[in-house]
Image (cartoon, rainbow, N blue to C red):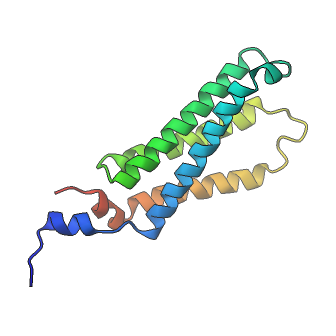
Amino acid sequence: MQNKTPLQAQKRQKRSFLLILLVIIYIVVAYFGWLRFSHALSGWQFYSQFLLANLLPYLAISGFAWGAFNLSSAVALWARWRWAPLLAGITAAISVIWYWLDRLLLTVPADAHANQVFAAFLSLLLLVFAFVVLALPAQRRFFRRS
């Protein structure tokens, strides 16, 4: 029988299903951020006909930020960096706040608030899910280094 050091046991510890699901969520949000960024750049001429002059750079910069922060969180969680849960929690909170600021301040009132209750429920659900997964004792042990 071999005696394994705690570091060897820690290296073999697998990612939980909930952590994998959380990483997938961060990747999906990052994808939509990069999509927003690329559409703002590729359709600059088209969108500039309909949007305020300073709104188009904002859409590009915010799409880049969404993509960069959420992808960074996903990579950090997957790579098991010690500070990954902190980054992921901050990213989740900022993403939800930023989403709601965009939704409330930049949308046209005609039918923009049609699914507001569903969006609020989903935002709250995803935020709580992220914080619960990151706060689980198994996840805390997973990211702890000896």
Q: Residue furthest bottom?
A: 1
In the image, residue 59 sits, relative to residue 77, either above or below, namely above
Q: Residue at x 35, y 52 (%)?
A: 79
Q: Residue furthest right?
A: 110
Q: Is residue 13 left or right of residue 54?
A: left
Q: Is residue 108 left or right of residue 82?
A: right
Residue 74 screen position, x and y as percent = 46, 49
Q: Quadrant of the C terminus?
A: bottom left
Q: Residue at x 17, y 66 (%)?
A: 8
Q: Residue at x 8, y 77 (%)?
A: 3
Q: Residue at x 59, y 47 (%)?
A: 29
Residue 101 screen position, x and y as percent = 67, 34
Near-viewer residue (84 or 101): 84
Residue 42 screen position, x and y as percent = 71, 27
Asked whether residue 13 is in view, the answer is yes
Q: Residue furthest top?
A: 53
Q: Quadrant of the N terminus?
A: bottom left
Q: Residue furthest front?
A: 42
Q: Is residue 113 left or right of residue 119?
A: right
Residue 133 screen position, x and y as percent = 45, 62
Asked whether residue 90 is in view, the answer is no
In the image, residue 4 sits, relative to residue 30, either above or below, namely below
